[in-house]
Every structure is written in structure tokens, then in C-alpha cells.
Image (cartoon, helix red, strand yellow):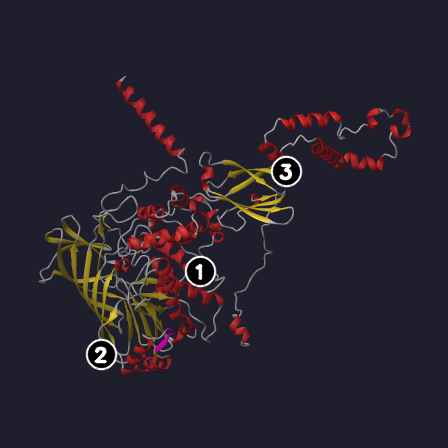
Amino acid sequence: MKKNLVLIPLFVFLSLQLFAQQNKSKFHQLKEEFATPNVYRTASGAPGHLYWQQKADYKISIRLDDQQQRIYGEETITYYNQSPDELTYLWVQLDQNMRAKDSDSYSGQSSEIRNQMSLESLSRLVPDFDGGFKLEKISDAKDVPLAYIVNKTMMRIDLPKPLKPNTNFSFKIKWWYNINDHVKMGGRSGYEYFPEDNNYLYIIAQFFPRMAVYNEVEGWQNKQFLGRGEFTLPFGNYEVRITVPSDHIVGATGILQNQNEVLTAKQLTRFKQASGSDVPVLIVSQSEAELAEKQKSTQEKTWVFQAENVRDFAFATSRKFIWDAQAVNFGERKVMAMSYYPKEGNPLWGKYSTKVVAHTLKTYSKFTFDYPYPTAISVHTADQGMEYPMICFNGGRPEKDGTYSERTKYGMIGVIIHEVGHNFFPMIVNSDERQWTWMDEGLNTFLQYLTEQEWERDFPTRNGPAYNIVDYMKGDKQSISPIMTNSESIIQFHANAYSKPATALNILRETVMGRELFDFSFKTYAQRWMFKHPSPEDFFRTMEDASAVDLDWFWRGWFYSIDAVDISLDKVSWFRLNSKNPAIELPVDAKEKFENRDKYISTIKNKSSLDQVHTEKDTSTLDFYNRYNAFQVGIKENEAYSKYISSLSEEEKSLLNAGKNYYQLDFSNLGGLIMPIILEFTYTDGSRETKRIPAEIWKTNQEQVSKVFVTEKEIAQIVLDPNLETADIDRNNNYWPERKEPTRFELFKARETNTEPNPMQKAKGN
């Protein structure tokens, strides 16, 4: 009996819990999903008065071996414990270990043989390249060896004694690794080989062991690096010495410290000229780069860079580099926008790259904060797109004859905007990329859309407009995951982490909040969290805090669910007030009666099939009712109307005689995702009017609602979501009168490989 007494209430409790979860309102506040506000992160979304974060400074010396394609490095890391916690060990990221032969990046992936296989896909089946770190020494600042353990892409260093709050610890690491061919093997870092001139172009990142983030949200962020979830890093200061062949040109995070030693007098003069120019100035010309390609110096030079308050460091180096630069003014401060590219990038890169960098800095700054770093660099690579503080690697290569397609041009401009834009998210607003890809990629893709539209009117943007996400949103739910999904677990990665959040933010800006409220709130978030580590809750809370708009329903639908927008305009009912004026109502009744009769099929056929009916043959059968007009106004009708009118107030009389039209519109939410209802009325006189109903109309019934509109004019047509604002996945139920949108199909025809010249080649007669 006791067991039953315990089990029954427990069963009832669990059933009630399940029922509550299944029937939870889409407007239910997100308090259960959000972390509890505290002294570190407030309920407003701002950093708390006791907010803290760790710091790591680096002194690094590396040598790039251009013969064997290797990196040799030594570093001293000084780690500052600014937390209230005592630490007994430190976690260091060894991201290059994802290229070790026993990496989970290879062994943890499903694989299959297809009819056509690339070298990259074959290399992943049984990798024969070993690109992992080779650790030669790990010691403290006095060269005393430290105890450590490597767990694939993470290394734990056990401290000789606990690191107390407000103290620091310095240690050294010596290592080397083989550089991968990123063109053949893929990857964010590596080299590209140019067989025509037997030269290499290196884009180097994740090349040194780096500190993991430790914070109050989840302790150490030591999730393994599997290739998708990117890099979560603390801020710090860097001094990096890079030894390369003496004819190489190096671009890197930070400011070059020894330019007099590594640049020629001519290059120094040109750089000074560029620092005062608002258009790109060549520092290394194409002819000079081509000469270096042929001569191939066997000597070496060391370039020294310093960077303050950055979360990472990357560089690019090659003797093939053309280098141009211009200044971008932020008040009294100048930022150098620069590009490094081989001749293979021209004429496209010389024409656009640095100008796009400058445009991106200005536009992003308008929506967030003034770009705080001294430089921003775009480096040309083959089919690449990756970001680091002050430097990024971007694809977009013309044909060998110098022509290029429209897709190549706009693809290059778009990727430069995107990767330069990453300086803002996550290089400065330093979100947890290992956990939440959307916090950097989604927010950045949204700003990329705004920046592209300010670069060129009707720029062919991929991500941002609501109509571009429809196919994804109406796809198989089993292959869609919520935006709020860990980076490594996302299905359809690009659509989930880039396109959908960018679209959601654009809808939030244009349709839900309006530009003024959105822009202020978004800028508030960016400025609150620049050079800090925000969480998703910090973003969600700030957007509401700064706007006074309750957006929990929006976050719940767009970020926590896989629902889609499909609002159906089910029915339109037209009403008018009965004036009871016989002079008005009787003719209306007559018109309706006779119109219906004259439209009836039998009436139409009888007009031609019946020559005469009986009363036409025998008129003696006609009587009073054949001559009586039931719709003629009589004395009694007028008396009744006068009595009715005298009983009304002046306000009621005015309403009665206004002749208003009342339209009741019935809607269904078929897709599940709550959204505002936007309607366009077209009146019988051809004029149009847009009506906007806030999402809160769905609060009491999230499946079906009705709304009455009162109009002066008669409505001829109603269109739901006329400007394609909401990503509605089925527009066939968006019209009254009903209108179906045709589905296009294509006549099947076997196609040969497209060898058509691009339009520039056609214009030249190629």
C-alpha cells in the first residue's frame, strides 16, 4: 500500500509535467531556459558589477620552413588568473591535433564510397598526412619541466602549486608541425602550391598552443576541436617573431615593429603615402612580386609584430604577394585597410579588395562601435574564407585570362565583407564559438547583408532576405535542428548557423521591432560586450532591455524550435450594418435576390428552352401578386423606419449612416511559428493599404485567430505577407480571393558539362 501511495502521486506529477511541457504557450517566458541572473551577468543582459575574465599574454618565435613546409615554434605564455577561483591546472588548445592520424575528426566521421571522390574526401578515409603538434618541451619560466597530459586537441598542464586569484603563471612550450595543403586537404590554415612558378602561399593560423577560456558560465571550455566548432579564446597581448625567406612579404595580426629592417626604402615611402590616402596605394606592385617569384632568395628575415588586447594571432606570407593599403578615418584615428594577393587574384583583387575592407569597417562600425584595431587585412587564397583578429583569408579568383563571372565577383566581395566583419563578432564581441556557432556566424551574416546592400543597390545577397530561407524552413524536420544547438551537433550547418539567424534578425529589424528600436538595441549589445565573453542569454536579454519589446516568443520560435511560418488566410466574411432604411435596404435585398436567380443554371437555360410559360399564354391567370413589388417602399415601412431612427442617439445615427464595410478575416497558424500578420488590401477603386497585426494576436489561441477590419471602401483583394517579410513557406493560402501560385517543373534533358565562356569572355570574343 505504501508503494502505491508513493507511485500514484509521482505518476500524476510526471504526467502533469509532461502535459505542461506539451501544452506550453509559445509566449511562455524563457526564464526556465535562461541561466539565473547574478553578479556576473545581469537580468538586463549587461555584464554584472563583479564580471571577470581571464587574460593570456604570448611571446612567440616561429620559423617557417619553405622547403619542407613546416612550422617550428617556441612560446612563453603568461596566464593571469583574474577569477575568484583557485586553479590547480590549466587547459591549452592543441587545434592542429585535429590533423593527427588518430584524430577524432577522421575516426568520428561516417564515410562511404561514391561514384566520384575528391582527393580531400579520399584522404579522410585513411589519412596519410600527419599534421598534429609535435611537442618537444613544456616547462615553467625557469625551464623546469611541467607535468602535462594531452587529450587529443586539448592539453592539461598540472601546476606545481595552485594558482590563486589575482596571480599569474608563466610557462614555455616548444613544438613543430607539418603544414597541410589546404587546397587539396581543406582546412582553415595551410599552404597553396603554384606549380607554374614553383612557389607557395601560406595562410597560417592555429599554429601555436593557445589557452582555453575559463569563465563562470561553464568553467573550462575544453570541448574537443572536431573541425566545426571554432575557437573560444581569452584576450591578451602578443609579441610574435616570424622568420621567413627574405623575399617574402608578411601580413599579420597587429603592428609591424621592425619595418625599417624588413621593408625597402621604396616600400616604406609607399606605406607612408598609403597611410594618408583614402584610395588604395600599391606598396608592392605586381611586377615586383613577379620578379621575387623568379629569383627565390635563400636568405631569411624575421618580421616582428605586436598586438594588444586580441584573442588570437594569424599571418600570411609569400614572395608572390602584391600589397596595397589605404587609410580609414575614425575621428582623429587612422586604421589601415590592406590587401595581400598574388597576381592570380588580379584584376579583381586590385580593383576591389581593399576598398571592400574599408567599406566593411565603416558600415559595421555604424551598427556596432568604431573599429578599435589599427589594421584590417584581406588575404587572397583559393576558395577560402576564415577570420582572425585584424586579418582574414578570402577566396575569389578570376580566370587565367583575367576575366571573371558575376558570381566570382560578388562572391569575393561578399566573403571579404563577411570575414572582415568577423573582427566585430567574435574577435571583439568574443562569444563561445565552440558551443554556439550562430552567435558569431549568424550575427555577422546579418551585418554582412546590411553591408552588401550599402555597397551596391540590389546586391545579390544569399543570406538575410526572408524569402531565401523558405526552402530550408519547409524541409524535412528530421534534417533540421534548432539554432540553439551545439556547433558539432547541427544538421545543415550553413543554413542553421548562418542563414536562419541572419534571416531572423532581419525579420526582427524590419517586421517585429522596427529599425530604430532594433538598431539601438543591437548597438547596445555590441558595446556592452566588446572585449568580453557574452552568452546567448546576454544577447536575448539586451535586445529586450534596450527596446521594451517582449521578444521571448520570437526567441522561442526562431531559436529554440524548428517550427516554420505558414499562416493561412482561411476565410473572409464581408458585413455591413443594416440601416433599416427601406429606401436603402429593400433595393439591396432585391438586387441580391434577382442576381442570384438570374445566375442560376436553370434560369439561364429556361430563357432559351421555354418559348412561353402558361401565364404568358393565359393572362387571365395573373393577379395582384403578379403586379405587386415587394421591394417598393410603402407607408408602413417609412413609419417603422421613422420610429426606429427616433430611438437612436446621435452617435448611433452617425454610425448607422456611415456605410462602413466590416470584414472578418479568419487565420490558421499551420506552420507553428508565431509571427505578426501583415496584410495588403486592394480596394475596388485600385488603391492599396497595408495593415500590420502584432504577433501578440496569437496569445490566447496559437492555432486559429480572427480579426475584424472596418473600411470605408470595398475590398477587392487581400494578400497575406505581400512583401515576403516572414519566410512563409506556403503562399498558396495567402490570397483572397483564392489564388494558387504555380509550381514550376522542367522538361528533362541530359546536359553536358558547362563550358560556356563567362560574359566578360564573350564580350572579348573569346
In the image, residue 257 lies at what x, y percent?
A: 22, 73
Q: CA distance from mark 3 to mark 1?
A: 71 Å
Image position, residue 339 (x, y; %): 35, 71
Secondary structure under the numbered disc 2 in the rendered image = helix
* Amino acid on which disc 3 is placed: Gly
Of pointers 3 and 1, the one earlier in the residue sequence: 1
Residue 216 appears at what percent x and percent y?
22, 47
Mark 3 lies on a secondary structure that is: loop
Residue 659: give its label: 3
Residue 204, quarter of picture: bottom left
Q: Residue at x 37, y 44 (%)?
A: 548
Q: Give residue 521's position: percent from left, percent from top.
A: 36, 51
**What residue would you read off at disc 2?**
261
- The majority secondary structure of the magenta stretch comes to loop
Q: Which residues are magenta?
A: 278-282
Whether the residues at callouts 1 and 2 have beta carbons within 8 Å, the answer is: no
Inspect the image, locate mark 1, and give the three-letter code of the amino acid beneath it.
Gln
Disc 2 residue type (three-letter) = Glu
**Which image quadrant is residue 386 in?**
bottom left
Label at residue 116: 1
Category of crowding for the residue at label 1, using alpha-carbon neighbours closer than 10 angstroms: few (below 14), some (14–19), many (at least 20): few
Residue displayed at 50% across by 52% down: 467
